[in-house]
Image: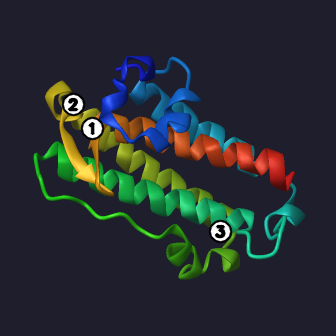
């Protein structure tokens, strides 16, 4: 499945920038490629930048990486539930509460990247295991309809969004 083939009615409009920024990519291939791109990018960030905040109250790079990890876990949980035909509406989450309740600022970059890699590899296995029918299933998350395959593309787009934020505001 390619991102350009994803119908816009399979995800909320506020996710469109994430999906549209991907261009024409294959879901499984891009889940893997973007994993390596993310790790390589973060490893090239100067060490003195990881605790930098570009404004008061903004997250530092370590906290953003933890946010990407936490969000990917939540997206994967949604994809799993919906792919298994669970029709229970799934709640949203407050990303600020999550970041405020982590120890990301006290963790090493290598530890965060290792965790990100483990989470993404797990999600790769999940998405590879799904049939076309399961990928097309639609459920409700954060009060909007979303398909399993859209969740995969949103995951990638969310990660890429934060790489762009790193470039524009932190480096």
Distance CA(mark 1)–CA(mark 3): 28 Å
Relative side of 56 to 90, left or right: right
Identity of the residue drawn at 18% across and 43% down:
83
Tell me the residue at 82%/53% (across/down).
169
Quarter-of-image position of residue 27 = top left
Nearer mark to the viewer, of 2 and 3: 2
Residue ID at (44%, 39%): 13
Question: Considering only order in the chain, which callout, 3 or 1, is on the residue closer to the N terminus?
Answer: 3
Compare residues 59 and 48 and report the one nearer the observer. Answer: 59
Label of residue 42 in the image: none
Residue 66: image quadrant is bottom right
Residue beneath disc 1? 147
Q: CA distance from mark 2 to mark 3?
A: 33 Å
Q: Is residue 78 left or right of residue 70?
A: left
> Residue beneath label 3, please?
63
Residue 136: which disc?
2
Q: Are marks 2 and 1 in contact (CB under 8 Å)?
A: yes
Mark 1 surroundings: few (<14), some (14-19) or many (≥20) residues within 10 A: many
């Amino acid at each position: 499945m390619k991102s350009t083939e994803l119908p816009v009615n399979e995800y909320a409009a506020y996710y469109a920038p994430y999906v549209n920024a991907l261009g024409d990519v294959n879901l499984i291939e891009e889940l893997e490629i973007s994993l390596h791109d993310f790790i390589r990018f973060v490893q090239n960030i100067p060490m003195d930048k990881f605790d930098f905040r570009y404004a008061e109250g903004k997250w530092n790079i370590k906290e953003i990486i933890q946010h990407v990890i936490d969000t990917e876990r939540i997206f994967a949980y949604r994809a799993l539930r919906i792919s298994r035909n669970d029709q229970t509406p799934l709640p949203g989450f407050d990303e600020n509460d999550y970041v405020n309740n982590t120890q990301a600022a006290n963790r090493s970059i290598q530890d965060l990247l290792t965790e990100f890699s483990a989470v993404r590899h797990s999600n790769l296995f999940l998405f590879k295991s799904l049939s076309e029918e399961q990928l097309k299933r639609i459920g409700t998350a954060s009060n909007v309809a979303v398909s399993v395959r859209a969740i995969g593309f949103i995951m990638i787009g969310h990660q890429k969004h934060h790489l762009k934020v790193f470039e524009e505001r932190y480096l």
